[in-house]
Image (cartoon, rainbow, N blue to C red):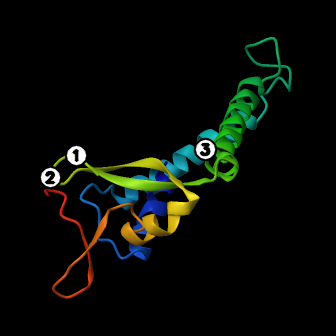
Amino acid sequence: MAVGLYLVRYRRKKLGLGRSSFRAWDTALIFTILVNLYLLVMPWYPPSDGADGGDVSFWYGAYVATGVGILAFCAVYYFVWVYVLPRFGHYRMRQEAVVLGEDTVTHRLVKVPNDKLVEWDETHDAVGRELSLDATNSDTVLADPEK
């Protein structure tokens, strides 16, 4: 999750968006990444009694292998849901910004039919906010969420 925060920061910077109002300290993120790496690696080390040792009667890494299997299944499910089904259903997934309050914005995924995809991309920015055409200077500006 901490690596994901760095990815979000990188993508926001690449899109020219400002800093988020909710921001975690870099020191806390690095510490979290190191702790998670330790927790990811340590279960694969066998106990001192050998591969069949430890406090259970089965292979010591069974729970780790089960967790990895569940994560692999989730990755396949995501791939099918986001890439395979839209190809057969003739639509694409796009994110849409939803304004919940003054400064609170969340996103949801929407299905956009292929024949309306160009129109969607012209009327929404990369974050999913709806764009409007300002008649006075013909520059593209963000639509006012209050209207």
The Cα–Cα distance between marks 1 and 3, rounded to whole angstroms, is 38 Å
Q: With 58 as the anchor, is 118 left or right in this view?
A: left
Circle 2 sits on which residue?
102
Q: Nearer the viewer, residue 27 or 67?
A: 67
The residue under the point 50% across, 69% down is 118
Residue 108 percent across, percent down from the top left = 41, 47
> Is 92 rendered above or below residue 89?
below
Q: Earlier in the sequence, mark 2 or mark 3?
A: 3
Residue 9 quadrant: bottom left
Q: Amino acid at mark 2?
A: Glu
Residue 51 quadrant: top right
The residue under the point 63% across, 43% down is 81
Circle 3 sits on which residue?
38
Q: Earlier in the sequence, mark 1 or mark 3?
A: 3
The Cα–Cα distance between marks 1 and 2, rounded to whole angstroms, is 7 Å
The Cα–Cα distance between marks 2 and 3, rounded to whole angstroms, is 40 Å
Quick check: marks 1 and 3 in contact, CB under 8 Å? no
The residue under the point 79% across, 27% down is 48
Disc 2: CA contacts within 10 A as few (<14), some (14-19) or many (>=20): few
Disc 1: CA contacts within 10 A as few (<14), some (14-19) or many (>=20): few
The residue under the point 22% across, 45% down is 100
Q: Amino acid at mark 1?
A: Leu
Circle 1 sits in a helix, a strand or a loop, which is it? loop
Residue 100's disc number: 1
Quick check: marks 1 and 2 in contact, CB under 8 Å? no
Q: Mark 2 vs mark 3: give the one in front.
A: 2
Residue extending furthest bottom? 137
Q: With 5 as the anchor, is 24 left or right in this view?
A: left
